[in-house]
Image (cartoon, rainbow, N blue to C red):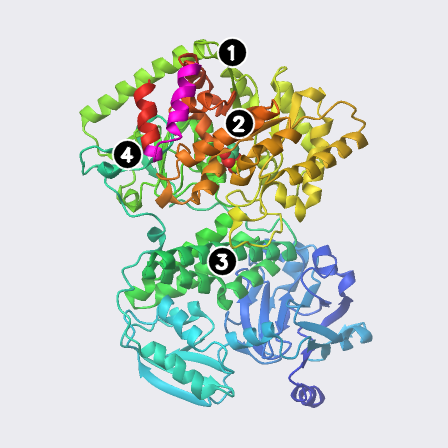
Amino acid sequence: MELAQESRLKSETQDSIVLLAPMTGLVVPLADVPDPVFAEGMLGDGIGIDPLEGKLVAPCEGVVTHLARTGHALTLQTTQGAEILLHIGIDTVDLNGQGFAAKVAQGARVKAGDILIEFDQDFVATKAPSLVSIVAVANADVFEIVERPGETRRGMIRIGEPLLVLRSKTAVSGASKAHAQAQPLHAADVPQASREITLAVAGGLHARPAARAREAARGLDARIEVCHGRRCASIESVVGLMGLGAGEGAAVEVRAVGADAAAAVDAVVRELLREVHGELEETPARVASPAPRPAAVMAGVPADPNTLAGVCAAPGIAVGTLTRWDDTQFDLPEAGSGTPAAESRLLDRALATVDAQLNSTVRDASQRGAVGEAGIFAVHRVLLEDPTLIDTARDLISLGKSAGFAWREAIRAQIGVLANVEDMLLAERAADLRDIEKRVLRELGYGQQNARALPDDAVLAATEFTPSDLSSLDRKRVAALVMAGGGATSHAAIIARQLGIPALVAVGDALHAIPDGTQVVVDASAGRIEYAPTALDVERARLERQRLAGVREANRRVSQEAASTADGRAIEVAANIATLDDARTAIENGADAVGLLRTELLFIHRETAPSAREHCASYQAIVDALQGRCAIIRTLDVGADKEVPYLTLPPEANPALGLRGVRLAQVRPDLLDDQLRGLIEVEPHGSVRILLPMVTDANELMRLRAHIDELGRAAGRTDPIEVGVMIEVPSAALLADQLARHADFLSIGTNDLTQYTLAMDRCQPDLAAQADGLHPAVLRLIEATTRGAAKYGKWVGVCGALAGDPLAVPLLVGLGVTELSVDPVAVPGIKARVRRLDYQLCRQRALDALELDSAQAVRAASREIWPLD
Ligand code: PEP
Ligand code: MG
């Protein structure tokens, strides 16, 4: 290196960094680089070089934080924290490593001028679109380019000549400080405090003590590392600390530099010497589910060692092969479909959402006094922000990988490190990483496992199915769904009912102990799963299935006819649908109308929100399929258990109480407006009724109604637009008369009404059996609704799951409900049930039920008066 450059290098201040040319070649301004991803600065500001020699050297001192597996690119982190991306050629990732030879390993510390990668210039030139290589600043939020000596000169530049000068945007910004703290001390750093200790903590330096040690040093002005043998890891990186492989009794050294070095070493040492026992047996993947319950607890039957109890989410009985769904791999695209910046945002959003979920899990667990459980998930939160994981993922994203792929690789790399540590207990901590791997991938929308080959009559078992899991199922092969967690009114349960697949939720952890491939009998209606049944049990289940199939067939034969009670009260039996396919199924099953079209699916499987025209086209296709029947179409109800990944909504502490339903329009009015415009255009006009979810009071309704009318006028509509209100918030039920004055009809969403009346999360498995819509409090609100509506002569329907519950049907009819909207496949059965009722009797008994003291009492009374098939 020439003297002048060397002295310039030495004259770098804390804030400025000189990057020397890492290649000899022709300088290419970034805007002229023949790849828009680079040219438009999506990977960061920088410069191009068209190389004349096949070698890439370090432009400055730093650590190789990421080396592409294919050897064509790497990221170097300077001592000040700038991340420099060095990328040889365009689209060279496709060469899969051919022609490249990395001369350093990931993690290596290098000096300016050290050789990093050699490459076969002729080979790469003929195989790739261009040899132009890029030097870019990947963390442009923290560092900016302030001078471009290489570019001003233009033409040739040689290795070691000044290329770019960077400066930190914020000399000591929180981000850069945190980043700097995440690095182990430099070789040149002389620790200002250090101590050697023997680890006392039970099980060694695994995730929880590592997280506690990190927490203990928080806020102190010091960079701290822990060393074991020849390896050191920053206190900021829990995965780095776990990767040291320091088991119980291992000798470690804690070292620190900075103003608070001594206090920091003391604080960390104190944590590492604490003897905390009883943490190692906890298995994170399982603790989220309720404890196993013998069937007897819930079903009132003698305890049977081969039977587990659960809560019925979709009725039916099935015999099949237990097939674990949780253990399958995620099918991820390697390349990102968006720009690196977009993929990075996706990852950030997924991490933030998972963090919010874990936060509420920790809170719930602490409130229940489940300290161990809370501790595990608190550590998962720490892992989520681990700089080693996040930096690795970001490096991969900056190289064009998808957010999901990058996250998985980052996790796997650390699992690989743990696999090499000798301490078995530490190696097992990989389970923590796997758990957050899955959670984040699911949040990124990779829950689908289409490629999975299922056995015939598969009984799929999982902790919980996501709606996207279910939308990709091969329905013909699935006999039943069984979940350790979940709730009977969760979206997964709703979808199971729509698919007509028997489903059992809240079975508990014991479900995980049933081996894959075991024959099981699932009697979802009775809330039980029997594993390893006797031949007699199987035979009995098959006979019962046959009998139920016979009843279903008889009901189907008369399902196209309208239903009224024996004493002549007409009850419309409509269908809840989400897709065009569902609409066809609804018609085949004799639905009189569509009582609820949930439009969330239209928003979910996309990258951007649908336009007004797309909305209109989707609804028009459904209305056309209904052959003259009317469709009640609900506007978007995302939030809480219904997520739409591309809506950049901030995570909420209580999503069920947040920006759900029409409240979303407060922050994204465009989404509702486009949907309303689409709805207004559907022909013939009277075929669509608009339904507004999560309305709280009449004032809100009046504003929305006026807005809909205004949009109607703008679209040239002169006929009235029918608008209904979902009654799913207690305030709406209590104010039903006021709402009925301004609405054309009311539709009770008993799933949410139950959740909000009883203050029981509809997805909380521990409460699944108690969150029952037949609770007298919910029934009283239903009665208040029908009474309020009657004042203004408006009709009331029920579109929540209660409408399809045979024990609830007589009571709803008795309370004055005249429309029941149920899953399409349930229509024939509900019509048959209605035909056998006497309205006057229903009325009397429903009023009696309002006086009962529990949901169980209501169920028992209903069963006695109106026995099930
Ligand atoms: C309900 O809450 O009962 C309802 C029908 O809406 P969803 O289940 O979609 O929240
Ligand atoms: Mg609802």
Q: Do the residues labelled 2 and 4 touch (CB within 8 Å)?
A: no
Q: Residue at x 53, y 30 (%)?
A: 785
Instruction: Name the residue type under label 3.
Output: Asp
Q: How many labels does the image show?
A: 4
Give the residue number, with chain letter if any, for mark 1: 562
Query: Disc 3 and disc 1: Cα gap in Å?
Result: 50 Å
Tell us which disc is closer to us: 2 or 4: 2
Q: Are marks 4 and 1 in contact (CB under 8 Å)?
A: no
Residue 731 to residue 456: above or below: below
How many residues crowd around disc 2 within 10 Å: few (fewer than 14), some, or many (20 or more)? some
For label 3, being within 8 Å of ligand 1 is answered: no
Assess whether residue 848 is covered by the magenta stretch: yes
Tell us which disc is closer to us: 3 or 2: 2
For the question of whether residue 723 can be seen, the reply is yes
Q: Which of marks 1 and 2 is nearer the N terminus?
A: 1
Give the residue number, with chain letter if any, for mark 4: 529
Q: What stretch is highlighted in magenta?
A: 839-856
Query: Disc 3 and disc 2: Cα gap in Å?
Result: 44 Å
Residue 175 to residue 486: above or below: below
Question: Which label is found at residue 787?
Answer: 2
